[in-house]
Amino acid sequence: MTANRTWVTGLCWKCEKNDLQVLWIGPAHSDDHGTAPLYTCEPCTQRIEALIAKYIDQRYAAT
């Protein structure tokens, strides 16, 4: 798992599996419901990290 982060047992908001080690990755914002803490499990966190890296690579390649 990712170092220097606090993992807790709970629900992954991406894959919706429960009783997993999940990581708070930031707030989720909803126009209808306000703000809630967004947690993801390790595989979902890694996938989001990969998507962020791809976005950044494409963003800088375009400039």
Image (tube, rainbow, N blue to C red):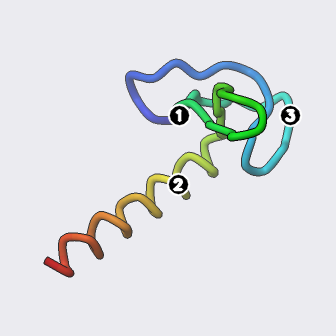
Name the element at disc 1.
strand
Name the element at disc 3.
loop
Single out the residue that lies furthest toward the bottom. 62
- The circle on residue 9 is none
Name the element at disc 2.
helix
Specify the amino acid type for callout 3. Answer: Asn
The first of marks 2 and 1 along the sequence is 1
Q: Nearer the viewer, residue 5 or 33?
A: 33
Q: Quadrant of the C terminus?
A: bottom left
* Residue 9 to residue 49: above or below: above
User: How far across and how far down the image is residue 23, in percent?
Assistant: 59, 30
Q: Which residue is rendered at x = 64% and y = 26% of the image? A: 37
Q: Which residue is mark 1?
A: 25
Few, some or many residues within 10 Å of mark 3 (<14, 14–19, 20+): few
Q: Which residue is mark 2?
A: 48
Contact between labelled residues 1 and 2, with CB atoms less than 8 Å apart: yes
Left or right of 3? Residue 20 is right
Left or right of 39? Residue 6 is left
Specify the amino acid type for callout 1. Answer: Ile
Few, some or many residues within 10 Å of mark 2 (<14, 14–19, 20+): some
Q: Which residue is rendered at x = 84% and y = 28% of the image? A: 19
Q: Which residue is rendered at x = 20% and y = 81% of the image? A: 62
Specify the amino acid type for callout 2. Answer: Ile
Q: Which residue is mark 3?
A: 18
User: How far across and how far down the image is residue 55, in percent?
Assistant: 37, 67
Q: Nearer the viewer, residue 24 or 34?
A: 34
User: How far across and how far down the image is residue 31, in percent?
Assistant: 69, 40
Single out the residue that lies furthest toward the left. 63
